Amino acid sequence: MGNKIKVLVLDDSMVFREVLSRGLSVDPDIFVVAKAENPFDAIHKIEAFQPDVITCDIQMPKMDGIEFVKQLMPQHPVPVIVVSALSEAVLDALNAGAVDFVTKPDIQSPQSVEAFIFELIQKVKEVSKAKIVDHKTVKVDKTINAADTSSKKIIAIGASTGGTEAIFRVLKQLPQNMPGIVIVQHIPPQFSTMFANRLNSQTHFEVIEGKKGEYIEPGKVIVAPGDRHLSVVRVGDRFKVDVFHGDRVNGHCPSVDVLFESVAKECGNAAIGVILTGMGYDGAKGLLSMRRKGARTIGQDESSCVVYGMPKAAFEVGAVERQYPLDQISRGICNMLR
């Protein structure tokens, strides 16, 4: 077994447990150590087999996946990938402490299953190195305030694995009178809509999914759709977004680099760039371009990242002016606006 990644598969469907364990076992670096049909069964097996990663369904008898993740994390901080149908519940599971998710395929379609297994294998490898970050409730710091809320400035944020929660925490702490904010989070289509709606209802910003031609305005947050790039365009002394289909950049569409490069070109020193938790190096080059054009830049520090990949790559190329733990990023942004 050597250094194989040990995976526990948790799903109440016997057929789907088999699909998952056979699919994952094809990869020479992964070993499925156990299968469980419900969370109680899983807890015993976690203690016995000490898996590195758990894949977990949401709808299960006896206890759902969200409750399972909530109860699991304090005792056994193991990275959990949610494998579930498309629903709002996935965001609840991420909020409870799961680190990533993959949408269940159509079991009747071999192509759909094959693409799903390929994606799941990549994610298992990524999150096996992930850190379980304690999801304490966000304490809103009332002393943070932004002096400059002009529409002449914009804030651009990029994130991947662990990012949905990190973005929520940053927005939750920012005062309402902020310059316009644009966000690229690596997220599948459909989920980006749910994510934007959730941020809209849980923060004091107007949060929308980006549409071509939408103006970036103070108090407004624009999230890239899950299958299109988002860039910024200057119109006189204002900014708006362009949203378009395109090839993957650094393996991603939307890509953080596409956003950051456009901000460097169109906004120059009238911008702040923020790179948060995530796997890989998307955003490092773009953030460096922003910094070279006079923008202020912030990277999330290693201790608070679920995966210190993107912020590390940006830091190593000299793109990051300041590094902060997640709960200090909002204050850092506001200090830079003064």
Image (cartoon, rainbow, N blue to C red):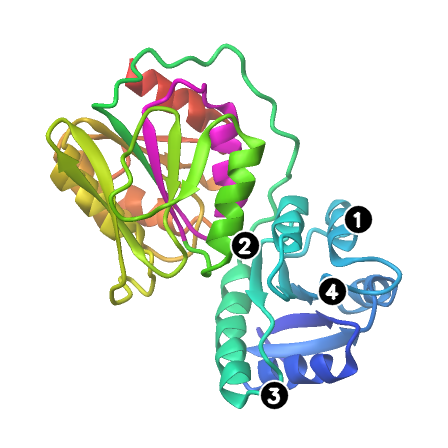
Measure how far apart labels 2 and 4 are at the Cα level.
Answer: 16 Å
On the picture, is 310 further left or further right than 5? left
Measure how far apart labels 4 and 3 are at the Cα level.
Answer: 33 Å
Foreground: 325 or 69? 69
Measure how far apart labels 1 and 4 are at the Cα level.
Answer: 16 Å
Dot 1, crowdedness within 10 Å: few (<14), some or many (≥20)? some
- Give the extent of the magenta segment: 158-185
Q: Are marks 4 and 3 in contact (CB under 8 Å)?
A: no
**If you read the primary sequence from the N terminus, does the residue marked by circle 2 or circle 4 appear first?**
4
> Which residue occupies 25% across, 23% down?
151
Helix, strand or loop at label 4? It is loop
Task: Tell me the number on the disc at residue 50.
Answer: 4
Q: Return the residue at label 2.
A: 130
Foreground: 221 or 156? 221
Foreground: 124 or 196? 196
Amino acid tagged 4 = Gln
Amino acid tagged 2 = Ala
Q: Return the residue at label 3.
A: 108
Task: Tell me the number on the disc at residue 71.
Answer: 1
Frontmost of labels 4 and 3 is 3
Helix, strand or loop at label 1? It is helix
